[in-house]
Image (cartoon, rainbow, N blue to C red):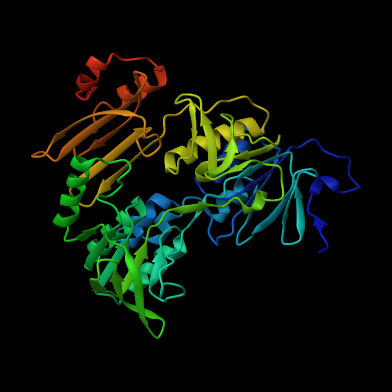
Amino acid sequence: MAISFEDPLLDSAKPRLLERRYVIIGNGFAGTTAAEQLRKNDAGCLITLFTDEPYPLYNRIALPPLLRKQVAEQKVIIRDAAWHEKNAIDLHLCTQVHAIDAHERCAIADGKSYPYDALLVATGGRPNRAQNPGAQDAANVFNFQYMDDTKAISESLEHSKVAVAVGGSFIAYELAEAFASRGMETHWLIRGPRFLRRMLDEDAGNLVDEAARNDGVHVHYHEEIRELVRDNGVVRNAVLTSGHTIDGDCFGFGLGLSMNTDVLQDTDVEISGNGIVCDDRLETNVPGIFAAGDVADFFDPILEMRYRMGTWNNAGAHGKVAAANMAGGDIRYHDVPEYSSKLFSSQNILQFGLSPEYRSDLETVSKIDAEAKKYRALYFSGGRLMGGLLLGKGNMGGKRRYVEAIKSKAAFPQDEWRAMLDWTA
């Protein structure tokens, strides 16, 4: 395939300029934040931003409210085309970057080559598709990751009475919550003993279960789908491993993500089973190539380990660190990852730092007030506070103190751990 070069610096009639060229693949929060920071720090640099979606940056956190019909689509879009034009960010919508030539330092898309001085891959992950018999290409079987997914599910719910959410993940929870809020008879199938079973213990799981049932959700634990029974391409019911059958009109799956690393497959960039391997500067083993957001398997110098974190806050923090270092800086990741959300109408959750989901060797102290529907857990390693989880409305106090304790890397005597559960300031 013939490749043409899209580079205003290669006009032979002009002397070569010294503007740095940046290519960013992925216009989610990590990629767009990086583009914004690069422009703030260098008014003359050239920034090319690619996305395979038809939308500029939208707020993925707002997709569940959009599905619940609590916000309008225009409120979900964060950066429009005019913003990109104003900031001289060359945005390519509906454009797949097919390959990276790391030796020539260029990205290849639609047969054109886009040279770079620094490249950021912020491609995130794609949802794992249901592999059950009957699921493939069914008209009413959905994943929930993108704007178009949200629109398709919402349209299906307009003509549905019974909806089924499948999975013990946060995505499956968001589906179950949205189904219930839209007036569906809602069934939530969880393979394990509780929601987020690698993070929540039985006490915390029971509080979430209570919140789900209070909102009318029928929760089915230790259940999986054996087969989806179709009629003319539309699933009519799910046959479960227990032998029970659930009739349904809309089926949503939250089965985790596979990282989008294909664009680097012909390079020397190290890829792990968890994403694109990078250091605490978010640079890969190939100089000039960086990763950020969900796809980055990065080293955290505070928690002193490598992991991948798929949260909105972390994506923004990554975008800023990556931008600084793409421009020649030497900034280390320095945030404690966290996320918060409501859980149905009666619960809230806040998780910060690490949890047993990431390291099974963490030591845990916890307490529950079942009457007040509040729960706290703190996670330690070698005496250091590594993370925590707060569950319950009005139970978020102390987060700043906990985060500062994590950043300090101080060791706390074990006989003080339980008292730390009562920190509120």
- Residue in front for this viewpoint, 414 or 399: 414
Q: Where does residue 209 sit, x and y in percent of width and height? A: 19, 51
Instruction: Tell me if I can see residue 107 in this picture.
Output: yes
Residue in the image at 59% along x and 59% along y? 52
Q: Where does residue 50 sit, x and y in percent of width and height? A: 63, 53
Image label count:
0
- Please identify the quarter of the rendering in which residue 156 is found: bottom left
The answer to whether 163 is drawn above or below residue 100 in the figure is: below
- Residue in front for this viewpoint, 154 or 193: 193
Task: Point out the residue furthest to the front here.
Answer: 242
- Please identify the quarter of the rendering in which residue 242 is found: bottom left
On screen, residue 15 versus residue 67, left or right, reads right
Instruction: Pick the quarter of the image with the C terminus.
Output: top left
Residue in the image at 36% along x and 60% along y? 72
Instruction: Tell me if I can see residue 71 in this picture.
Output: no
- Residue in front for this viewpoint, 360 or 296: 360
Q: Where does residue 275 sit, x and y in percent of width and height? A: 55, 44
Q: Where does residue 262 sit, x and y in percent of width and height? A: 63, 53
The answer to whether 234 is drawn above or below residue 101 in the figure is: below
The answer to whether 317 is drawn above or below residue 6 in the figure is: above
Task: Point out the residue furthest to the right here.
Answer: 13
Task: Point out the residue furthest to the bottom here.
Answer: 232
Task: Point out the residue furthest to the left here.
Answer: 371
Residue in the image at 16% along x and 56% along y? 213
On screen, residue 156 versus residue 247, left or right, reads right
Instruction: Pick the quarter of the image with the N terminus.
Output: bottom right
On screen, residue 109 versus residue 359, left or right, reads right
On screen, residue 142 versus residue 21, left or right, reads left
